[in-house]
Amino acid sequence: MRYLPQTQASRDEMLSAIGVDSVDALFKDVPKRAFVDGLVDLPNHMGELEVERQLGAYANENMGASDGPFFLGAGAYYHHIPASVDHIIQRSEFLTAYTPYQPEIAQGTLQALFEYQTFVAQLTGQDIANASLYDGASATAEAALMAMRVTKRSKVVIGNALHPDYREVLKSYVDNFEGTVLGDGGLDDLDNETACIIIQSPDFYGAPHKYEAYRNKCDEVGALLIVVVAEIVSLGLLPAPVEADIVCGEAQSIGLPMSFGGPHLGFFACREKFVRQVPGRLCGATEDADGKRSFVLTLNTREQHIRREKATSNICTNQGLCALAFTVHMALLGEDGFKRLARLNHEAACKLADTLSAVDGVEMVNDTFFNEFTMKLSKDSREVVEALVCKGIIAGLSTDDGQHLIVAATEMSRDEDMEAFAEGLTEALA
Amino acid sequence: MSADAKVVEMTQDEQTEMNRGLHYEENLLWEKKRSDHPGVDLPQPAGLKSRTGVLERGDIGLPQVSEPQVVRHFVRMSTWNYSIDHGFFPLGSCTMKHNPRLNEKLARLPGFAHIHPMQPESTVQGALKLMYELQDWLAELTGLPGVCLAPAAGAQGELAGMMTIKRAHELKGQSQRKVVLAPDSAHGTNPATAVMCGYEMRTISTKLDGRLSIESFKEALYKTCDKGSDIAGMMVTNPNTCGLFETNIVEISDLLHKAGGYFYCDGANFNALIGKIRPGDFGVDVMHLNLHKTFSTPHGGGGPGSGPICTTDELAPYIPVPTVVKEGDRYALQWADSRETTLGRMKGFVGQFGMHVRALAYMMSHGADGLKQVSEDAVLNANYILSQLKDDYYVPYDGPCMHECMITDKHQKEAGVTTLDIAKGLCEYGYHPMTVYFPLVVPGTMLIEPTETESKDSIDRFITVMKGFAADVRAGDTEKFHDFPLSTPRRRCDEVKAARNPVLRWR
């Protein structure tokens, strides 16, 4: 077995040093009934080539975004990842390090996290950011729980079209905490018992939102305003949600492949007055015994390993390497590159909107958008999606009512892809 | 945190001044001179009129440097990290084993990396098949057939496990069960999770031998109701956080089940059992697994993890959605509309799929024979370390231990050398320290987990260093310990200062 360095001779030597005659003697505390009789019922070990062949065959059974025209978004986006990103995150020193509990030998990870937190704070227009959460959905749920702690209230209001996955995860977390989630009533649901209102922008259907009215109402009733951003590239073109108390969401678009839904990157930023209520890890600057600038994980007293049942969250491992990928990609993009990327995404969506709205049977639902928008189709959108799969096109997301199609364009969308999509759509709707 | 809290700046000159040999200082991206060109070349936008319906964003304040500068920046920073690829990493309860690169390669195949979780199922059959097989492998290894791969990491798996228990009680009309039992040696995530579920945590004190006794368990179980009818369940790590197998686990789980509670097992220490012992066979009802521990997916400096849960048939109806099911020769995701008893959803999409690929590749590489060897070697290595250090360090609990062993600084502390000093000494001598000051039940603990991917030579060198420290202390050579580490990129960092005046970003 290629991953196991012990030899039979070294095992025997160690057993005799311990003073037992077999390895089973070391398992003497385990009750008999818990032992497997012989081996578990699974295949025996395989060489690298065999594993690669078998799993490679599985990969080939999938139709990937790189195989043809691709217009699906809805919270996970197909973007280009510069080669240096993957090179850096595969360096052993980053890839195979642990959570930086020993700062003297983990300054690389720590400085990267400090830079990550700075990027997220700048993009969201917030004072501070944490060192990442699992994904956009659980970050939204953690934001709602934090609002419940801060306000000591238990009602959470979904203010607009929040991603359905986020909605469901939010409900699982908040229900569990004996809170209530209200949706669809918008501002009218806000009252003196409301902990927060959650506004996604661009919303699930792709429309950007303004925050002023929500801010005013929140101030009136003492609730927090949570802004959710599921496509972080949008923050290169749309104004920063500075009105918000918490901005959270999904940053997969910068540096991470879609990977069938994970690992992605939940981000979380807020006003600095809430710093002691923030869930997850925080990296802070300090100095070492020689007075040199250094970085450490800080404010640990919020966390489960110190506070135990009084912790702000149970989170421990988060998305460290994903945050690094984001940081490297952001460093490559820089101010001009990030804003240009955002503009290219928007222009791709403008082109796509023009191309598709010329098709008979297509009606634009939102005429304001960033890189994603929704169309009403004259035929069942679920069938349209399936029909386009047969032409090698991933068309977008059909809504559950079968009437709408949500489509996204990014810098990856070429003119010929859009034309193929329009052609396919014309046939499917004819 | 005050608004003027700023990071101390490092100028280019200071950076140059501090470089020595192969050690390069590196300032923050924001401290670098702005380049005209970013590190990407993107096409010129056409200049179309915006259709966002909102104002266009102005300056963000991001740094801007070219690609070679970016690469050098991060490569230099990487050299300040210790990693499993550098050397022995005996961090207890964290299972820092070798991370095979084959797994990285496979997860990056375009057919895995560039698929979207909401694509039509007909276009992702290979991905669903992989998840289905992973569910099967985990079910067989744990003896627990209900598997959900969705939880994002151990703590979320733990939460999913406890929410499964809560959902089961609710649907069985047992909502009065509000108390969860856990030993005082439990991981911090356990009580934090129980509270997130709205449960009250009741601590079971462990015996002098570091294990749960039937008496103290009964005392906790029947404390407020003589039949234990207010008990929702218990959270026990087995092997426990002292590295010991709970000898009374079968009797304890029988008592718990009789009282109507469920047994949640924290799977952080599954490396001691894999391929040899099945938790489903010692009474566990639900457990999570850390794919980033037992199944070798890289820790990545703090994630991404992946924390699937495995349950008995009885609890399977309540686990989160989605799970992967096989219908004829097709694979499909099962959602709440066809399993209404589910507790709902824990995570967006289907989970950390990239980690699923890596974990399955790991298990296929080992197979049934190799996985059994994994647990046997892991346990052998830990016991060997214990046998070699027991004359130099205080051993609170006699062996045999499982995959990790515990020693403390009791002997050294009398001479003024603490566990922290020993940990920092290991940093100086080219090791990542063991887990220190955890679990909390014994003062000054050092929890050493070698894993199976170390050779005897590697372990012997570590033992030599540890014995050397003990000898130095005995000889009165203790002063140096307070100064360790000396040769690392940074010396001891002022954590009090960091917390008193938090500086969490560049400004």
Image (tube, helix red, strand yellow):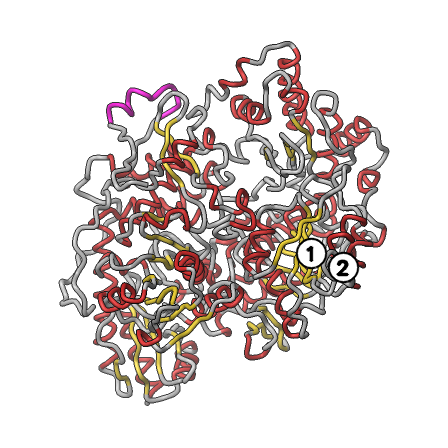
The number of callouts visible is 2
Question: Is residue A270 found inside the magenta-colored segment of the image?
Answer: no
Q: Is residue B23 magenta?
A: yes
Subunit of label 1:
B
The residue indicated by pointer 1 is B234
Q: Is residue B84 visible?
A: yes
Is label 1 in contact with label 2 (beta carbons under 8 Å)?
A: yes
Q: Secondary structure at mark 1?
A: strand
Estimate the x, y position of residue B22 in percent, counting from the top left.
Answer: 39, 23
The stretch of residues the image draws in magenta is: B12-24
**Residue A403 vertical placement versus A78 (above, below):** below
- At horizontal 21% and vertical 50% (from top left) the residue drawn is B60
Find residue B443 and report its horizontal and vertical position in percent: 64, 31
Q: In the displayed structure, would residue B313 be above or below residue A92? A: below
Residue B256 image label: 2
Say which of B148 and A186 sits in front: A186
Q: Secondary structure at mark 2?
A: helix
**Looking at the picture, how far across and down is residue A354, in whole percent?**
21, 76
Residue A240, image x, y percentages = 24, 57
Inspect this view and state whether residue A420 appears: no
